[in-house]
C-alpha cells in the first residue's frame, strides 16, 4: 500500500482511538451528583449517561474491542513505515551500519507508531477527559450508544463471559453509588480548599452531620446546675432566684428535682409577686404548666430536635433509665451546637479559651466532640464511654481527678487546675513541642 494512504489510515485510527479513550474515562468518571444537576437543568443526555453507567459492562466491552482492534490495525499499517527513509539515511550518513539498516528502520517505525498512539490516542485524550468528565460524557453518549447497538452480538459474548467469572468469585457487577458522610465531607473539604465553601459554611455542614452522632446529654445543663422551685418555697427565695438566674422558665417540683410537677414562666410569676398577689408557689397552681417534654438520655441531637418539633416546645427534661433527672436541654442549646462558631458568644460563656499558641483553658463539662475539633484530635480512647473532657480525665486516671493531676495524650498535656467538690472545673491543655529529628549529614 502507498505510504501516503498508510499515513492517512493511521491518522484515522488515532482519531478513533481518541474517541474511545475519551469515552472510557469520561463515562467511568462522570459523577452522579453533577449528572443529576444537569438532568434537573433539562439535559437529556445526562440521563442517558446515568443509565449507561448502570450497565458499565456494555460500554467497557465496546471500548476494549475498539481499542484492541485499532492497536492491531495500527501495528499492521505502521510496520516498517519509516524503514525506507531510515535506511537511506543510514546508507548515506552512517555506512558502517548499513548491514543493520533494515533492523534499525523497523525499530524506529515501531517507536514512532507506538509513541504516536500512546501520546495522541491515549494519554492526551484521557487527561482531557479527567478535567471535565461530565461535559464530555454527555457529548459522546449518542455515538457510544450507536456503537453498543452495532457490536451487540460481541458484547453479549464477551460481557457474558466476564459476568460468569464475576459470579464465580462473587464480585459485585453494579456500580456502588451510595453516598456516605465521608464522601460529603470529602467534597466539602475540597470546596473549602478551593475557596468555594467558606470556613463558617464548612463548620456548619460538619455540625449538621454531627447531630446524628452526638448524644443529647453531651450539651445538656447538668442536674446540679438546674435552677428549680418547690411548692413550699417562700416569696423571698422565689424573688432571689428570678433575680439571680434570669431564666424564662423555671421547673416546679414537689420537694426535690426528681419530683417534677411542671414549670412556670417567669413573666407570669414575677408580676404577681411584685403586686403581692401570691406569697409562694402553692398559690399559683393555675399558672403551672404540667405538660413537660421529657426525653431519655439515649437520644441523639437529631432525635431530640425532632421531639422539639413534635411537641412545639423549646426545652426538655432528660431522664436516665432509673427515672432520675440528669439534665435539661433547650432548643437554643441544639441550635448553638449546630451553628458552632457562627453564633456570637461572650468570652465568659466560652468553654474553651485559647491562652496563646498551643495552650487552652477548658471547662470540665466541655463535650469531647468540641475538644476534638479545637485540638484537631481524631479520636479519644474509648470515647463512647464518656461525654466530657472531665470524663476523659477520669477514664485515663482511673480515679477521681485531683488538682494538678496530669495526663499526656496525642502530644498534649491535660492538667487539672481546679476541682470543685470532686468535680473537675477547669483543665489546662498544652501542646507538647516535639523536637525535630536530627538531620543526616
Image: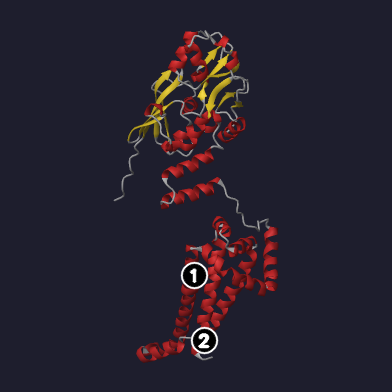
Query: In 3D space, how far apart are the residues under numbered discs 2 and 1 (Cα atoms)?
Result: 23 Å
Q: Are marks 2 and 1 in contact (CB under 8 Å)?
A: no
Secondary structure at badge 1 equals helix
**Quadrant of res 88:** bottom left
Q: Residue at x 32, y 36 (%)?
A: 357
Front tag of 2 and 1: 1
Q: Residues within 10 Å of mark 1 (few under 14, many from 20)?
A: many
Does the image show residue 36?
yes
Viewer-proximal residue, 146 or 335? 335
Viewer-proximal residue, 122 or 212? 212
- How far across and down, in percent of the image, does residue 179 sit? 58, 50
Q: Which residue matches tag 2?
A: 6
Viewer-proximal residue, 113 or 215? 215
Q: How many marks?
A: 2
Where 96 falls versus 75 (above or below)?
Answer: below
Q: Residues within 10 Å of mark 2 (few under 14, many from 20)?
A: some
Residue 125, numbered circle: 1
- How far across and down, in percent of the image, does residue 174 sit? 65, 57
Viewer-proximal residue, 141 or 240? 240
Amino acid at each position: 500500500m502507498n505510504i501516503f494512504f498508510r499515513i492517512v489510515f493511521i491518522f484515522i485510527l488515532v482519531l478513533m482511538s481518541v474517541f474511545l479513550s475519551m469515552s472510557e474515562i469520561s463515562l467511568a468518571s462522570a459523577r452522579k451528583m453533577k449528572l443529576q444537576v444537569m438532568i434537573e437543568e433539562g439535559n437529556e443526555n445526562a440521563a442517558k449517561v446515568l443509565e449507561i453507567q448502570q450497565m458499565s459492562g456494555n460500554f467497557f466491552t465496546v471500548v476494549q474491542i475498539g481499542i484492541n482492534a485499532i492497536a492491531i490495525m495500527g501495528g499492521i499499517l505502521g510496520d516498517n513505515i519509516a524503514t525506507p527513509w531510515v535506511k537511506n539515511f543510514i546508507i548515506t550518513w552512517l555506512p558502517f551500519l548499513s548491514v543493520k539498516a533494515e533492523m534499525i528502520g523497523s525499530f524506529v517505525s515501531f517507536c514512532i507508531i507506538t509513541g504516536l498512539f500512546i501520546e495522541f490516542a491515549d494519554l492526551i485524550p484521557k487527561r482531557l477527559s479527567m478535567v471535565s468528565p461530565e461535559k464530555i460524557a454527555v457529548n459522546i453518549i449518542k455515538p457510544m450508544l450507536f456503537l453498543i447497538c452495532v457490536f451487540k452480538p460481541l458484547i453479549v459474548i464477551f460481557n457474558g463471559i466476564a459476568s460468569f467469572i464475576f459470579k464465580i468469585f462473587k464480585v459485585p457487577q453494579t456500580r456502588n453509588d451510595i453516598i456516605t458522610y465521608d464522601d460529603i465531607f470529602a467534597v466539602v473539604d475540597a470546596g473549602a480548599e478551593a475557596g468555594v465553601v467558606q470556613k463558617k459554611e464548612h463548620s456548619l455542614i460538619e455540625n449538621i452531620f454531627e447531630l446524628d452522632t452526638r448524644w443529647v446529654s453531651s450539651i445538656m445543663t447538668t442536674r446540679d446546675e438546674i435552677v428549680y422551685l418547690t411548692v413550699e418555697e417562700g416569696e423571698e427565695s422565689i424573688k432571689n432566684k428570678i433575680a439571680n438566674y434570669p431564666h424564662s422558665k423555671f421547673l416546679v417540683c414537689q420537694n426535690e428535682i426528681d419530683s417534677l410537677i411542671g414549670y412556670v414562666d417567669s413573666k407570669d410569676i414575677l408580676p404577681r409577686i411584685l403586686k403581692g398577689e401570691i406569697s409562694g408557689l402553692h398559690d399559683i397552681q393555675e399558672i403551672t404548666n404540667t405538660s413537660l417534654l421529657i426525653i431519655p438520655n439515649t437520644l441523639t441531637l437529631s432525635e431530640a430536635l425532632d421531639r422539639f418539633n413534635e411537641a412545639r416546645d423549646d426545652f426538655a427534661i432528660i431522664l436516665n433509665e432509673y427515672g432520675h433527672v440528669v439534665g435539661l436541654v433547650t432548643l437554643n442549646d441544639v441550635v448553638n451546637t449546630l451553628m458552632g462558631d457562627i453564633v456570637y458568644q461572650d468570652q465568659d460563656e466560652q468553654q474553651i479559651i485559647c491562652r496563646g499558641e498551643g495552650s487552652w483553658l477548658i471547662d470540665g463539662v466541655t463535650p469531647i466532640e468540641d475538644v476534638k475539633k479545637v485540638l484537631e484530635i481524631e479520636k479519644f480512647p474509648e470515647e463512647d464511654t464518656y461525654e466530657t473532657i472531665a470524663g476523659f480525665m477520669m477514664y485515663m486516671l482511673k480515679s477521681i481527678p485531683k488538682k494538678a493531676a496530669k495526663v499526656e495524650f496525642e502530644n498534649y498535656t491535660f492538667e487539672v487546675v481546679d476541682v470543685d467538690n470532686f468535680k473537675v472545673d477547669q483543665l489546662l491543655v498544652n501542646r507538647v513541642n516535639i523536637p525535630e529529628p536530627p538531620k543526616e549529614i
